[in-house]
Image (cartoon, helix red, strand yellow):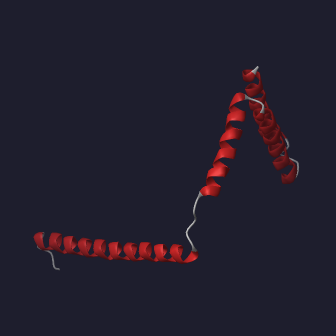
Amino acid sequence: MNKLKLGLVFVLITAGIAGFVVLSDSPMVVRILSILMGAVLAGVVAKYTIQGQAFYVFSKESIEETKKVVWPSRKEALQTSGVVFAFVIAMALFLWFIDAALMSLVKLLMDQNV
């Protein structure tokens, strides 16, 4: 029975996409609604499959875990961002210096004007 439901999910999604293609002369709103209706109906059917129920439980648990996260304060976020930007600038300058030094060395070894 589960495979039949999953097949119906596939058919509903395909029907929504086919409606988008078939309704090419219709306004874009109707075409988009065709896809959305196919997706919503497929989601409703998928909720009653084993995989759909497992996904629903996973989603609920993910929301619960997100609520447990301790987010940084504005001050902490700005300080961390400042450190990251300073590091990026320092690294860019370091790599630019190394690149310039190696280019000068290559030109010197090839007897070109520096």
Instruction: Choose top left, top right, bottom left or bottom right for residue 48.
Output: top right
> Height in image: 45 above or below 102?
above
Q: Position of residue 85 (x, y in %)?
A: 43, 75
> Height in image: 25 above or below 67?
above
Asked whether, in this view, residue 8 is left or right of residue 27, the answer is left
Asked whether, in this view, residue 85 is left or right of residue 91, the answer is right
Of the pair 36 and 19, the residue shown nearer to us: 36
Of the pair 33 and 39, the residue shown nearer to us: 39
Of the pair 81 and 114, the residue shown nearer to us: 81
- Identify the residue at horizontal 83%, vertical 38% (top origin): 41
Residue that lies at the very extreme toward the bottom in this rendered image: 114
- Identify the residue at horizontal 65%, vertical 41% (top origin): 58
Q: Position of residue 113 (x, y in %)?
A: 16, 79
Asked whether, in this view, residue 68 is left or right of residue 83, the answer is right
The tally of labels here is 0
Query: Which image quarter is the N terminus in?
Result: top right
Q: Position of residue 87 (x, y in %)?
A: 37, 73
Q: Position of residue 72 (x, y in %)?
A: 55, 69
Residue that lies at the very extreme toward the top in this rendered image: 1
Query: Which image quarter is the C terminus in?
Result: bottom left
- Identify the residue at horizontal 35%, vertical 73% (top origin): 92
- Identify the residue at horizontal 81%, vertical 39% (top origin): 38
